[in-house]
Image: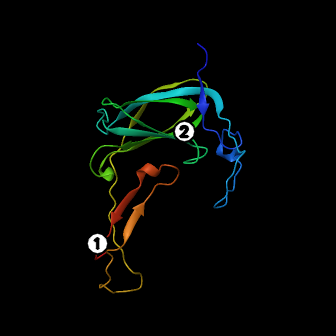
Amino acid sequence: GAPRMGLVATFYPSGSQLAQATRIEVKAGTELSGQDIPLRKERVFRLSGKILNPDGSAAKQSMVLVNGVEAPLGGMLMFRPADDKGVFTVNELPAGEYSVMVGWMGAGPRDSHPMGQADVAITDTDVKDLVIQTQPPLEVNGSFVIEGSDRKDIDFSSAYVNAAPTGNDFLGTGLATVKADG
């Protein structure tokens, strides 16, 4: 019945958030000592749930990424696989707000598989039975043109398009090459 305690991400000198960190500058060839970082021990929680495909079936071969909303990619970042029934569990999360993203970890091109995302706030209890239903990837078509020019002899084959969502959901990026005619 006692609260679970665990070691959590700690930023120098002893902060629990990236905003509390102090930068340490180390010049090339310099040895630095005396910069100890005592790990913080705090109450931790469990996040568990299930990942579903767009048709409602279990999303096998899925990967869950839990990312702290306060400091995306600079704070809490945990990867966990889902089992064959799409069930996942992430332990040792301190209280906070998280973005839970679902991606594909199986064979084949990543951009052909469904993805999903949910925001979760953990306050004073475990989060159980979170369900994330994935969505099929979007397809976008278009072409390159040179504004103000009627030239048709430009080779665009060395160009590419990178589409990325706003916010901290970097799993939803897409990369495409461009055909020679644009």
In what quadrant of the picture does the C terminus appear?
A: bottom left
Q: Is residue 9 above or below residue 146?
A: above
Q: For residue 84, which quarter of the picture?
A: top left
Residue 107 point in image, percent of width and height: 27, 46
Can residue 95 be seen from the camera position used here? no
Residue 179 — which label? 1
Coloration mode = rainbow
Q: Which residue was labeled with disc 2? A: 98
Question: Which residue appears farthest toward the top when viewing the image?
Answer: 1
Closest to the observer, 8 or 136? 8
Residue 73 vs residue 105: left or right?
Answer: right
Which residue is painted at 28% across and 72% down in the image?
179
Q: Nearer the viewer, residue 74 or 144?
A: 74
Question: Residue flagged by tag 2: what amino acid is it?
Answer: Tyr
Q: Are marks 1 and 2 in contact (CB under 8 Å)?
A: no
So how many labels did they put on this image? 2
Mark 1 to mark 2 CA distance (whole Å): 39 Å
Q: Classify the position of the N terminus by image quarter.
A: top right
Q: From the viewer's perspective, is residue 11 above or below residue 139? A: above
Image position of 18 with respect to 81: above or below: below
The three-letter amino acid code for the residue at tag 1 is: Lys
Horizontal side of 163 relative to 30 (left or right) equals: left
Q: In the rendered image, which quarter is residue 81 located in?
A: top left
- Residue at the image point whose x is 31% and y is 29% from the top: 85
Quarter holding residue 37: top right
